[in-house]
Image: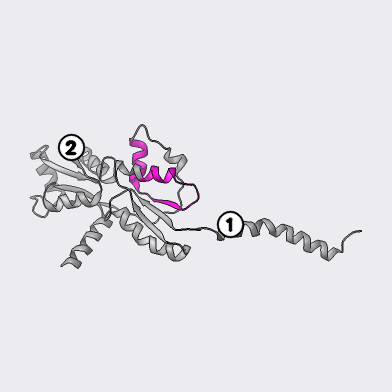
Amino acid sequence: MKPPRRRFLHLAAGIAVLPFSAHVARAQAYPSRPLRLLVGDAAGGAPDTIARLIGPWLTQRLGQPVIVDNRPGAGTTIATEAVVRAAPDGHTLLAMSSSQAIAAALYDKLNFDFIRDIAPVAGVARTPLIMVVNPSFRAKSVQDFIVHAKDTPGAINMASAGIGTAPHMAGELFKMMTGVSMVHVPFRGGPPALTAVLGGQVQVYFVATGSCARWRSRRRSAG
């Protein structure tokens, strides 16, 4: 006995909707617990600042807390490897910067393949690098700095957020383009490097603009 035509159409429509319904149910189940957003820089740096700005927004959109987890060191590779080794369920995210891409090209042996093991989700910010010096430093312009550096080769200490980070590469590029000689002093993250510039222990630092804004706001609130 053949089923009535209307009943047959209803059954066919129901079968067609089943895969879509299952997909919607899976999508609604994410995230099922708090998310971790790993940052390969110290607290107060530009990647950390951006992560802490987007964290509350993601919490509101996704309905689960977003916990910022700082894992500085080794040119951001510590944080990257932690994300690679985490369960591939979307609950461990990486706030990456150009430093991760630099590390992928700089280090011969890594415990992960950056292109294969990391999947991009979205671009959220652009942070240009600027050259900063202590206010007491004699050079007051880039040209003055170049002249002074050439007159005193090797006497200027250049801070960075660590070997292979964007500030380090920016400083090395500056040295190549200008022909000046500076001593590289790596720190464990951007904030310690900026602190050393403010304290006069090093003379120059190529810093992301987000870090400068964070420090300015801190100084205003402290004053």
Q: CA distance from mark 1 to mark 2?
A: 57 Å
> Dot 2, how many residues are within 10 Å of its Cα: few (below 14), some (14-19), or many (20+)?
few
Q: Is 215 in the magenta?
A: no
Q: For mark 2, what is the residue?
A: 179
Q: Please provide percent x and percent y for residue 15.
A: 73, 58
Q: Could you tell whether 55 is left or right of 189 in the image?
A: right
Query: Can you say which quadrant of the picture contains the N terminus?
Result: bottom right
Q: Where are the magenta residues, as a range?
A: 79-106
Q: For mark 1, what is the residue?
A: 26
Give the structural element (helix, strand or loop) at label 2.
Answer: loop
Q: Is 104 in the magenta?
A: yes
Q: Could you tell whether 60 is left or right of 99 in the image?
A: right
Disc 2 residue type?
A: Gly
Quadrant of residue 209 within the rendered picture: bottom left
Q: Please provide percent x and percent y for residue 13.
A: 74, 61
Residue located 11% across and 55% down the image: 135
